[in-house]
């Protein structure tokens, strides 16, 4: 029996683990000149994690496509939190 490939390449240099679910993606406003995002996700042990990534790293590390990005991306996470969606 072969083991399935994990759904990650690497997430960040401190955490290695399969990405179980991406919960939220948003712009990291600290970087105005480049596209950087913050990502909140759960790993294979159901532990909440977060990291900041560039546009390229987001798609490579998390192995997502544009459709998943569109579903998880939130323009204003503060507004989402007030609505109780996060």
Image (cartoon, rainbow, N blue to C red):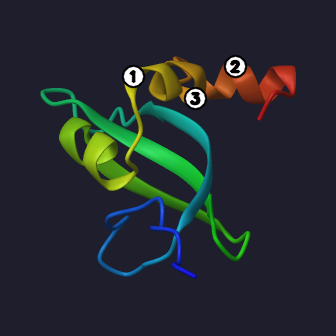
> Residue 56: where, in percent of width, then height?
19, 40
Mark 3–mark 1 CB contact (< 8 Å) = no
> Residue 62: where, in percent of width, then height?
40, 51
Q: CA distance from mark 1 to mark 2?
A: 23 Å
Say which element carries label 1. helix
Q: Quadrant of residue 1?
A: bottom right
Q: Quadrant of residue 31?
A: top left
> Residue 55: where, in percent of width, then height?
24, 36
Say which element carries label 2. helix
Q: Residues within 10 Å of mark 3 (few under 14, many from 20)?
A: some
Q: Quadrant of the C terminus?
A: top right
Of badges 3 and 2, the one in the foreground is 3
> Front-most of 22 and 38?
22
Mark closest to the chain's N terminus, 3 or 1: 1
Q: Which mark is residue 66?
A: 1
- Horizontal side, residue 41 vs residue 81: left or right: left
> Residue 44: where, in percent of width, then height?
64, 71
For disc 2, the marked residue is: 79
Farthest residue toward the front? Answer: 1
Q: Quadrant of residue 77?
A: top right
Q: Which mark is residue 72?
A: 3
**Is residue 9 positioned above or below 68 on the image?**
below
Mark 3–mark 2 CB contact (< 8 Å) = no
The structure residue drawn at horizontal position 26% and vertical position 48%, both measured from the top left corner, is 60
Of badges 1 and 2, the one in the foreground is 1
């Amino acid at each position: 029996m072969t083991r399935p490939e994990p759904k990650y390449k690497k997430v960040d240099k401190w955490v290695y683990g399969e990405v179980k679910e991406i919960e939220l993606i948003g712009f990291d406003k600290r970087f105005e000149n480049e596209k950087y995002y913050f990502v909140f996700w759960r790993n294979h042990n159901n532990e909440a994690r977060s990291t900041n990534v560039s546009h390229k790293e987001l798609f490579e590390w998390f192995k997502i496509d544009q459709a998943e990005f569109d579903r998880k991306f939130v323009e204003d996470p503060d507004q989402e939190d007030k609505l109780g969606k996060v």
